Amino acid sequence: MLKKTALAAAIAATCASPLHAYAADSRELTEIREQIRQMKNDYESRIQALEKRLAEAHSQQKVPATPTAAASQLVEIPAIAVAPVPAAAASNGNGFNPAISLILGGTYAHLKQDPTQYRLQGFMTGGEVGPGSRSFNLGESELTFSANIDHIFSGQLTFALGSDNSASVEEAFVQAKGLAGGTNLKAGRFLSGIGYMNSQHAHTWDFVDAPLAYQAFFGGQYKQDGLQAKWIAPTDTYVEIGAEIGNGGSFPGTTRNKNGANAAAMFARTGGDIGTSSSWRAGISYLRTRAEDRVHTELDGSEFAFSGRSSLWVADAVYKWAPGGNASSTSLKLQGEYFRQKENGALDSGGNYRSGAQSGWYVQGVYQFMPNWRTGLRHDRLHSGTPTIESGSFPSLAPYSPQRTSWMLDYSPSEFSRIRLQLAQDKSRPGITDNQIFLQYLMSLGAHGAHSY
């Protein structure tokens, strides 16, 4: 009988590596993935053979077949879930034994200014913009199911549970990893790979809220309903290239009654180690989409709609330092992103609109000064440019440069829990300063895969 402990030990020994090994030799990573795939296939085949023999033996004795102890367990190591198939599902070649994780979050917000009057002056925004509501609020919780489907495909479904009792599908995709030439494919709904933070779930962010640039240009985060392909070059230096096509339904685009791909994105990134204690990564991304009757609300409550093309460039960079590696009690992470957007189209008032070049950026640093304790500082700034509008008056689009500075302190008793204090001074509206205080908790229950670099 195959022992679960032997399986876990064999796979864990093959996969053990420090977190900063993301920039390791791509050829070695490819070999490790191939070894893991072969081991999984071998163990699953042997378990299925044993289950078949057990089922036949029980059938001859005319008693119901039951799965063995090995087949009824899920063996988990970081980023890999091996789910042996019970006899009841052997005819389909696939069993349902997913890894399940739940993220619980909540905040208390003390805001000097009325959040219902919040806006980013000079920008046509959509999605989630602003600091949220005052007082106690249930944050966005996440419920995730993930599992290997077979030796090629895996799947993931993430529900976002809002404080207003709403539930929505944040991600739902199938993925094929380790294909020929180091190519990975993803199909369904997923957080786009553009930029640095966009593909990260909110509970992994270093601050309570998204940078102003993410709010202005993505409405929080940009999702694709479509296809994504990523390729890792077989070189000593880490190089990744990716492309996406989708229906373009997420802001700054809108859902359109049109066949084919309504949005396209491309990204490229590279990185590596600096000695034994530091690593870096840099990337550039491009998004092109279209909007049709995208509604924006004016200061007096009236609405107008924009239809036209939107294009956006993003440059990002991150540097990490941890003396002595991941076991160090101190570490430093520096990151920043720069956004540059152009929109051209028509307003439903009959006038033509051209945004010119709108831009935004943020820089932040997070320092772990002792075990379990971190502090960080972030500065955001936007530049609306001077739009060209042939007719009509739109006060919310008058030129302005919103900015904000945030400081945070958080404590993590373990990798499964975090408590955070954040203070911010927000100047997103002309002549108005909003002093903000946030208290946040984040709790992780169940299996949870390793986060990206």
Image: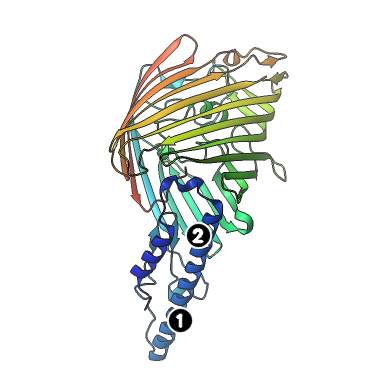
Where disc 2 sits, the SS reads helix
Residue ID for mark 2: 32
Using the rendered image of the protein, determine whether residue 136 is visible from the camera's viewpoint: no
From this view, report whether residue 285 is shown above or below residue 261. Answer: above
Where disc 1 sits, the SS reads helix
Q: Quadrant of the N terminus?
A: bottom left
Which quarter of the picture shows residue 208?
top left
Kindly report the distance in space between the C-alpha atoms of the residues bearing marks 1 and 2: 30 Å
Query: Between residues 176 and 352, which one lies in front from this camera angle?
Result: 176
Q: Position of residue 281 (x, y in %)?
A: 52, 37
Task: Give me the residue at 41% from left, 57% from top.
Answer: 99
Residue ID for mark 1: 52
Query: Between residues 46 and 428, which one lies in front from this camera angle?
Result: 46
Using the rendered image of the protein, determine whether residue 245 is visible from the camera's viewpoint: yes
Which quarter of the picture shows residue 225?
top right
Report whether 190 appears left or right of 116.
right
Three-letter code, disc 1 = Lys
**Number of the label disc, if any, that sits on residue 346:** none
Query: Between residues 397 and 214, which one lies in front from this camera angle?
Result: 214
Query: Between residues 283 and 204, which one lies in front from this camera angle?
Result: 283
Q: Position of residue 103 (x, y in %)?
A: 37, 45
Task: Give me the residue at 28% from left, 38% from top.
Answer: 372
Disc with the residue nearer the chain's start (1 vs 2):
2
